[in-house]
Image: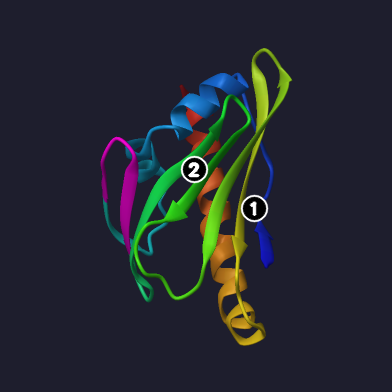
Amino acid sequence: MVKIESNSSSIHKSSLEVFEFLSLPANYESLMPSKVRSFSSTETEATLDIEGIGTVQLAITEKVSPSKIVMLPQNKVPFKFDIQWDINTINDSVSTVQAVINADLNFMMKMMAEKLLKDFLDVQVHKLTKQLNAE
């Protein structure tokens, strides 16, 4: 299993506020990088059409309030993976967030996909920070 981590970012919101935002799949639309051609969501899932990869249907499968959210693909994908959001409390009005992909990648897939996946996570964390700090 390959662990790919985004940059960690400080957000001027409580960990509960960040957790509640990330608990709603519809909120992820504003976090998507430009490689995502389309996005749709339900109460529990988000469907992304990613350029060069195809359609990925993600569901929130685990929530540990206010510190962790785990998402798993619900459709057939080229490799097994999960996306985990780790939220840490700094104080009542500041928290940090980091996104992690745990992926079952062979050496060749790792060489091809690792940078793309890290960039995907970094864009999401950056947009999350920018959006929540602006509110």
**Residue 50 part of the magenta-drawn span:** no
Q: Which amino acid does the dot numbered 2 rest on?
A: Lys
Q: Which amino acid does the dot numbered 1 rest on?
A: Ser
Mark nearer the viewer, 2 or 1: 1
Which structural element holds mark 2? helix
Q: Nearer the viewer, residue 29 or 79?
A: 79
Q: Position of residue 80 (x, y in %)?
A: 52, 67
Helix, strand or loop for the magenta stretch, by majority: strand
What residue is pinned by disc 1?
A: 6
What residue is pinned by disc 2?
A: 127
* Nearer-N-terminus badge (2/1): 1
Q: In this view, does 101 lie above or below 125?
A: below
Q: Which mark is residue 51?
A: none
The span shown in magenta is 40-49
- Res 57 → quadrant: bottom left
Quarter of the image containing the N terminus?
bottom right
Q: Is residue 131 above or below residue 124?
A: above
The residue at 67%/84% (across/down) is: 107
**Left or right: where does residue 28 sit relative to residue 103?**
left
Q: In this view, does 109 lie above or below 79?
A: below
Q: Residues within 10 Å of mark 2 (few under 14, many from 20)?
A: some
